[in-house]
Image: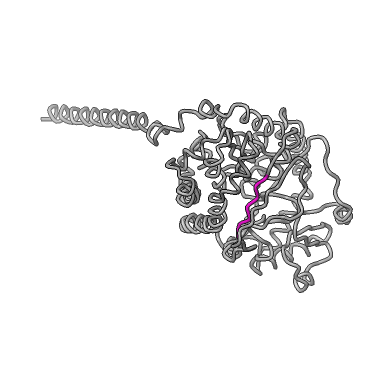
Amino acid sequence: MLNVANSIADGGHNVTILRPYHSGFSIPKDINKKPNIEILDYIPDHYEPVHPMFEHVSKGLWYEKPTLFSMPSTAFSFSSLVTSSLATTNRYVLTDKELHIKLKSRNFDAFVVEIFDLSGFYLNEILEIPAIIGVFSAVRQGPTEQMFGGVNVLFKDWYAFFWNSVLFGRLFEQQHENYAHLVNTSKTMTEIVTKSSFFMVNANPYLDFPIPTPPSIVQIGGFTMSKYNAEKLSSEYEKILSEHDSAVFISFGSMTKSSQMPEHYKAGIIQMFKLLPEITFIWKYEKDDSEFIKQLPNNVHLKTWVPIFAEQPHNAKMLSQHGGAEIYEKEELSDGKKLANVIEHIVNNPRYQKNAEQLRDILKHQPIDPKTVLLSHVEFAARFPNMKSSLVPSLINRDLVSYYCLDLVLFLASLALFVFFAIAKSISWLYRKFRSSIKDKTA
């Protein structure tokens, strides 16, 4: 959200960031913000830096594989965990009259809200800021996009989509139960959330999979990257990357920590390091473990934090689609030899670099800068806060039968069935007639 704030501030606007502290979610102390950005930190008395259940959940991700049985479990457990971690602080935010007076006094034109935590939408029921804009920091979020007129899932993907919908449905409805009475509203969760002029997602049409998108859903993926001025690496990383001709960065994201990886996975990765001594490896490893470091060869550098975001399966599939990556399942990390072969193949095959450079050039020269897309839509929403109703297609209000044209499908299926039985009956009648005529001739 800081990057969103910086982009808006670059447009010459004054920005205020309300930053509530929640247990389980750490917030960096030193941030790079524009001078016309004000940060209001809200720290309740109950605040705890780390929620113990988050450590348990993040560790469990290493052992969990999406199956028919794990998806329902994740949908229920994760949504409850997140809701409980957000609830207490958000109750303070939604009932703090002094905070409300302070925010109202600024006469904001627009309110940008992270849609994962819905409290901002309920706060706006009190503040009544004219324009509100939902933002989702991950790539795509199908169930939420549906509320803004996004296309529904194909039947072939129904199982994973169903449990993803259950997860976010529970997450949102539980938050609604916690917050609605605090702001004295009788509106449904969907009515409150879809007051947004736009729903902004961290996706890019030139990188992501093609999908019909209504004007209410705005893709801003890449807005943090400069099209013209690539930042230089620090001297530390320049030195590391100069050690060998090739370098590989290893990260499993923020939730899935390398330090919590099962030992046989670590052993497989270390084996891969030793099999590829001519390649430099930078590994995002969250703990300073001196005993573990002793097991590593000289071509490996551990870093507790590296500036990169969202290493999700969806991103891997996107890059693979463009020919610049290969997908490797975590269950195979213990096979160091196989992992080494895959990395060596990518490093030595010029096709991957060629495709990656082509994708880089496409994104660099895309017709409209994503940062411009973000800023112009925020300014548009602030100027025309009531435009939302004309941007969402009427398809969103249709039921399952009309959405999938199931009535037409049923009619055509019935017609096809009728024709099939009619043909079968005709063939049966002709066959009996034929047999009857043969019997008459032989009698």
- Residue 22 part of the magenta segment: yes
Residue 312 position, x and y percent, is: 63, 50
Q: Tell me: 330 left or right of 193.
A: right
Which residue is farthest left? 443
Image vertical order of residue 430 relative to residue 220, above or below: above
Give the quadrant of residue 222. top right
- Percent from the top left, x then y, of residue 107? 63, 36
* Magenta segment includes 70: no
Which of 328 and 289 lies nearest the eye of the viewer? 289
Q: From the viewer's side, name the closer residue of 384 and 41.
A: 41
Please identify the quadrant where the C terminus is shown: top left
**Horizontal and vertical percent for residue 175?**
49, 50
Up-down relation of residue 344 to residue 267 (above or below): above
Q: State the residue at coordinates (47%, 43%).
A: 189
Percent of width and height locating residue 357: 78, 39
Q: Nearer the viewer, residue 249 or 232?
A: 232
Say which residue appears at 62% left-offset and 63% top-offset: 48
Is 398 in front, or is 26? 26
Q: Is residue 282 left or right of residue 80?
A: right
Please determine whether, in this image, residue 379 is positioned above or below residue 342: above
Residue 25 vs residue 346: left or right? Answer: left
On screen, 269 above or below 353? below
- The colour mode here is one colour
Q: What's the residue at 89%, 55% (across, down)?
A: 239
Seen as rendered, the residue at the extreme bottom is: 291
The residue under the point 82% across, 57% down is: 280
How many tags in the picture? Answer: 0
Q: Find the magenta span and give its range.
A: 17-23
